[in-house]
């Protein structure tokens, strides 16, 4: 099977951790590098978490590069409210079996992309700060990127009413990425909030009995609390795993090609993804806009959960 070479940029984070594990378990993906971005917790914490998640999966040979401590502009507003003090509160985490590499996140991306024989897919599971820095420093490397599969945005928000957390944390970076001209698969809230796991399904996951399935079910037990208490949802939303599932099981999603822009200035809407679903900019204002973003809107939830469980069962 031909594998899709990916770099995973993440801020683990419960759903990042699950996404990372799903990628490791997928025979159709080759994870070339993992890079971290400040988001759900400080850059040091999310970097440690990424290494611990790889350690849990007994994968010791994928380089992990640490990112910067803040977004392009201003200070970090971390996601500790949802992910806890460590960023991965809940299960007992293993000791790290290895250390991050010397190169920082962007240097590691550059090296990996330059050395690759084929085009790389970037998977972005946190704020888009690293990807933006990469495109600003090395715009020539854009042509070696096949596509970006990201979790972010939506037609509504989850941090402020109009904006989703990953985009809201670093809107300037999101603008650079959405203006890059690279094809994007966008798993925003419209789809990720449909991709939830019920308690009953989480029990099935735990009952699979392997270490990683138990670990993931414990992550969900912690992570679901916010979705129940604050959002009143029927299960635990798995945002970031959608960006992996969109690559390995694209047939379970429904999507539309849209032009997407990022709001930078609005008092109530900074960080909003403005999705021109109908094509108003072209039809009314005659503005030629590339519809380079495949916006995911729907998912076959039961298949999503079935594939997640299968993937976790393949790990130690
Ligand atoms: C996104 O924000 C983070 O808390 C999650 O890891 C996910 O990437 C959801 O809005
Ligand atoms: Ca994330």
Image (cartoon, rainbow, N blue to C red):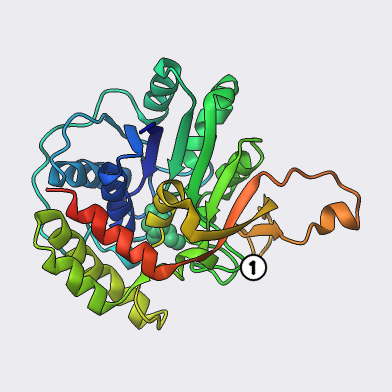
- Relative side of 265 to 130, left or right: right
The x, y position of residue 115, in whole percent, is: 40, 16
The residue that appears at 44% across and 42% down in the rendered structure is 123
- The answer to whether one can see residue 9 in this image is yes
| Image height of 181 relative to 164, above or below | above
Question: Camera-side residue: 256 or 283?
Answer: 256
What x and y, as percent, mark residue 174?
Answer: 57, 46
Residue drawn 37% across the image and 25% down it: 108
Q: Residues within 10 Å of mark 1 (few under 14, many from 20)?
A: few
Horizontal relation, residue 92 to residue 236: left or right:
left
The answer to whether residue 236 is above or below residue 103 is below
Q: Quick check: can you spot residue 76?
A: no
Residue 297 appears at what percent x and percent y? 57, 64
Front position in the image: 174 or 306: 306
Q: Which residue is mark 1?
A: 268
- Badge count: 1
Q: Of helix, strand and loop, which one carries label 1?
A: loop
The percent position of residue 157, horizontal first and vertical second, equals: 55, 68
């Amino acid at each position: 099977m031909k594998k899709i070479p990916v770099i995973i940029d993440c801020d683990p984070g419960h759903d990042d951790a699950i996404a990372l594990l799903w990628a490791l378990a997928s025979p159709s993906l080759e994870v070339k590098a993992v890079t971290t971005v400040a988001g759900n917790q400080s850059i040091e914490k999310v970097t440690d978490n990424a290494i611990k998640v790889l350690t849990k999966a007994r994968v010791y040979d994928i380089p992990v590069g640490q990112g910067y401590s803040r977004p392009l502009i201003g200070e970090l507003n971390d996601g500790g409210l949802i992910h806890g003090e460590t960023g991965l509160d809940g299960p007992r985490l293993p000791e790290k079996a290895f250390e991050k590499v010397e190169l920082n996140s962007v240097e590691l991306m550059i090296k990996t992309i330059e050395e690759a024989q084929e085009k790389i897919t970037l998977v972005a599971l946190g704020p888009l700060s690293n990807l933006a820095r990469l495109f600003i420093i090395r715009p020539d490397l854009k042509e070696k990127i096949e596509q970006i599969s990201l979790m972010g945005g939506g037609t509504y928000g989850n941090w402020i009413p109009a904006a989703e957390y990953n985009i809201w944390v670093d809107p300037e970076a999101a603008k650079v990425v959405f203006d890059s001209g690279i094809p994007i698969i966008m798993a925003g809230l419209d789809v990720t909030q449909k991709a939830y796991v019920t308690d009953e399904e989480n029990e099935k996951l735990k009952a699979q009995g392997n270490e990683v399935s138990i670990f993931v079910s414990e992550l969900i037990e912690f992570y679901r609390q916010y979705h129940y208490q604050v959002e009143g949802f029927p299960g635990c939303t798995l945002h970031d795993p959608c960006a992996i599932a969109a690559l390995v099981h694209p047939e379970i999603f429904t999507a539309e090609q849209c032009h997407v822009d990022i709001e930078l200035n609005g008092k109530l809407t900074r960080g909003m993804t403005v999705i021109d679903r109908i094509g108003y900019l072209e039809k009314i204002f005659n503005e030629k806009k590339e519809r380079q973003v495949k916006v995911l809107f729907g998912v076959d939830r039961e298949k999503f959960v079935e594939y997640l469980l299968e993937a976790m069962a393949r790990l130690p």
